[in-house]
Image (cartoon, rainbow, N blue to C red):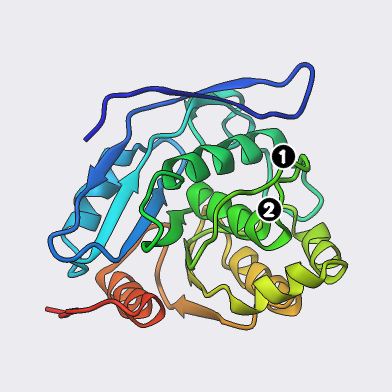
Amino acid sequence: MSNRNFSTSSGSGNGSRTFEFGRTHVVRPKGKHQATIVWLHGIGDNGSSWSQLLESLPLSNIKWICPTAPTRPVALFGGFPCTAWFDVGDISDDAPIDLEGLDASAAHVANLLSTEPPNIKLGIGGFSNGAATALHSATCHVLGHYGNGNTYPINLSAIVSLSGWLPCSRTVKNQIERSRDGIRRAASLPLFLCHGRADDVVAYEHGENSARTLSSAGFQNLIFRSYNGLGHYTVPEETDEVCRWLTANLVLEGFRLN
């Protein structure tokens, strides 16, 4: 568990903002360390609450890193300041995108993963606003650069999105299709997206449309799961499926589902 505060610039040139990230919580693997996953919370939450849930999962070979987002004004809440990985005003395809905030958070995640041993598989997962940041990181990995053009340095092996959506969905497909390396990386990166049909915060259609966009952009190893009656939260059925999927795609040893 760490009390360090991280300061990350968006790196987009003159006038770029600096973001102060909060406390990072680490859940050490109880068995052989085979994978490290950064898990990103939703708006208004923090890394601590998810670290407690992740520690209870039967995935003894995964190290979980649970950072806390910067506190910033969020347009969706009338500018009220709360923890968020990037500013959100609307989730529609036509909504303005806080690309600077997205890139800064994706860079912070990449920095957290950059010191892991070379034989360890790396992944990113998240819930809601954190899930959107995880999917943005996936597109940065595939394209080889952040939205601002800076090189993306991490080789990812798995992405998990719970109750999230794909930011910049209108441009992702065209960008990947113009890149031979992007097409290759998209085909090989496993994605697992889950969404509740009763979600009243991030509407189900946003999750479904994001999965469809990613599939059409070349993400061939993508699974989308929907859950009847599930709102904007997670349930054991969902986390059990995440455990099975991570075990299969990261080739983890010793998985036992209670």
Q: Is residue 93 visible?
A: yes
- The answer to whether residue 27 is left or right of residue 186 is left
- The answer to whether residue 231 is left or right of residue 106 is left
Residue at numbered disc 2? 167
Q: In the rendered view of the protein, which quadrant contains the N terminus? A: top left
Q: Earlier in the sequence, mark 2 or mark 1?
A: 1
Q: Residue at x 36, y 62 (%)?
A: 120
Q: Nearer the viewer, residue 36 or 164?
A: 36
Q: Nearer the viewer, residue 164 or 156?
A: 156
* Label 2 neighbour load within 10 Å: few <14, some 14-19, many 20+: many
Q: Residue at x 43, y 77 (%)?
A: 227
- The answer to whether residue 129 is left or right of residue 256 is right
Q: What x and y, as percent, mark residue 224?
A: 53, 78
Three-letter amino acid code at the position of disc 1: Leu
Three-letter amino acid code at the position of disc 2: Pro
Callout 2 touching callout 1 (CB < 8 Å): yes
Q: CA distance from mark 2 to mark 1?
A: 9 Å
Q: Secondary structure at mark 2?
A: loop
Q: What x and y, as percent, mark residue 114?
A: 46, 45
Residue 99 falls in which quadrant of the image?
A: top right
